[in-house]
Amino acid sequence: MGMPANDDINRRIEAVWRIEAPRLIASLARVLHDVGLAEEMAQDALVAAMETWPTRGVPDRPGAWLLTTARRRAIDYLRHEALQARKHEQLGHETALLQRTDDDEMERDDESGDNLLRLIFTACHPVLPTDARVALALRVLGGLSTPEIARAFLVAEATVAQRIVRAKRTLADKRIPFEVPAGAELAPRLASVLGVIYLIFNEGYAATAGRDWMRPELCEQALRLGRVLAALVPREAEVHGLLALMELQASRFAARIDSRGEPVLLADQDRARWDKARIRRGLEALAQAAALGGADGPYALQAALAACHARAERYADTDWKCIAALYARLAQVAPSPVVQLNRAVAVAMVGGPQAALDLLDRLADEPRLAQYHLLPSVRGDLLRKLGRLDEARACLERAAHLAGNDRERELLRRRALACTHHPGA
Amino acid sequence: MAYLLTILEPRGQRATRSAAEGRELYARMQAFAAGLAARGVLLAAEALTSEVDGCRLSVREGHCQVVDGPFAEAREMIGGIFLVDVASREEAQAIAADCPAAQWAAIEVRRTGTCYE
């Protein structure tokens, strides 16, 4: 049996890293009180692995190897710092923590869970701008490299690198404690964490049409983070609500794109291609959120909406009354013009196009929707159903003009064209 | 992407262990599963009792045939399963390599999906 090729080893290292990085960084940050520093020590261990594993082989317990190596780097760093500052007492305490050897497991599970939770809350701290939270979370909680994050978000590597450097510096400068928030602080901090996870998911979800495999992987990362969080704070209903929402949306992956890579509308999707296991997990998580008294949470309500679609075996079976009611509730709990827009779509299915158009007219002056292609797109479809074809075509052309990606633009142009060639269709 | 890790043990291996040894290995596997759950990748994990308790069933031309275990023709028996949700085969493989059972059994790594594509 020959030595595996370097490519194989590198892929293995990368895979081990993705799985182990969060716990590794969390464990180091607990001792170093500095997420940025912990991440750098962990990176050093990764570099050491890339240098030694290809020649000496992958160790039996790669995760434990990485932790031991990173701890040694951290001890060296602390010694160096202490020498300069002559803070020997503190050094003794910290190195003792770092030198612990846990034979079998990297750490006791409860302890490592607490550290991971601290890391999640720190990386998603509201003191950081949103894009920095997302980048830092993917870096320290997802084990993604800077170029990978840049590719996933279609921005320059230097931009991401800068966001991460600044985020680490901000956490250090503002002396953000490496702790799980308690009391009144918990709810807004948890909302920030959930927001970051959902942003990561949506970025991947919106881009499933792209050729790059990195972007769909964001969805996997978000789901994984959601599950970790649900296990760590199992009494928080909205965590289960978010998990349900992501599972249910992810269940449609395979059906969202046709064989030529074109997006397929919900109405036209082959529902046999929906992932039944994901739907089941999504419905379970939604039931969990409801059992905890969180059926009216914004994520749970969105999950309930996705569940209405998931439960309909055919598009014609969709319970639009239920959907319109859920949107009405969501519009109260988390009012937004986008929710109103979706509510109008559901109302059209229940009460006809004119009722929906009346709802939409209230959104006409909404500045947040001025550049949003779905408003003229929905309007255009309603007008077409009412037989007002010239107005419909103008709306759909405007929607095509505003659409952010080529495929969607193409789809809207075709719908605009259909208003000319097939009147009454 | 969900992957099924199936543990394929040599038949008769369990009988060579004392009860205490068997419990120790089981505890290690439980700890391994807890670690996967803590990493957010575990969807399901089950250990299976001996195939002596099991049977194989087939229906041909309306006739149901049941063969009770153990299945003499097989050299391996399915000892348990893990269902994990990870981004790539490499990650599924890294998890399998880290599984304690890899030391005494083989682990088959398979991607879930439709069986006609």
Image: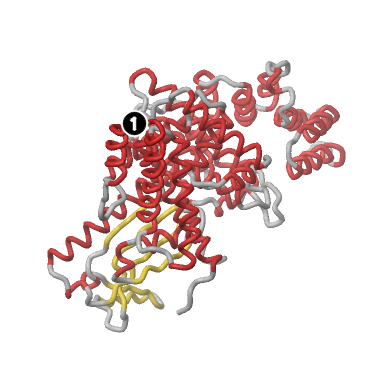
In the rendered image, the vertical position of residue A82 relative to residue A406, given as above or below: above
Q: Where residue A381 appears, x then y in whole percent?
A: 74, 32
Question: A227 or A104, which is in the foreground?
Answer: A104
Q: Where residue A109 appears, x then y in whole percent?
A: 28, 45
Few, some or many C-alpha atoms within 10 Å of disc 1 (few <14, some 14-19, many ≥20)?
A: few
In the rendered image, the vertical position of residue A365 relative to residue A409, given as above or below: above
Residue named by callout 1: A87
Tag count = 1
Q: Where residue A193 appears, x then y in whole percent?
A: 46, 31
Q: Chain of mark 1?
A: A
Give the left or right position of residue A92, taking residue A344 as reference: left
Image quarter of residue A64: bottom left
Q: Residue furthest left?
A: B19
Question: A232 or A63, which is in the foreground?
Answer: A63
Give the left or right position of residue A358, taking residue A11 as reference: right
Residue A366 in view in this figure? yes
Residue A311 in view in this figure? no
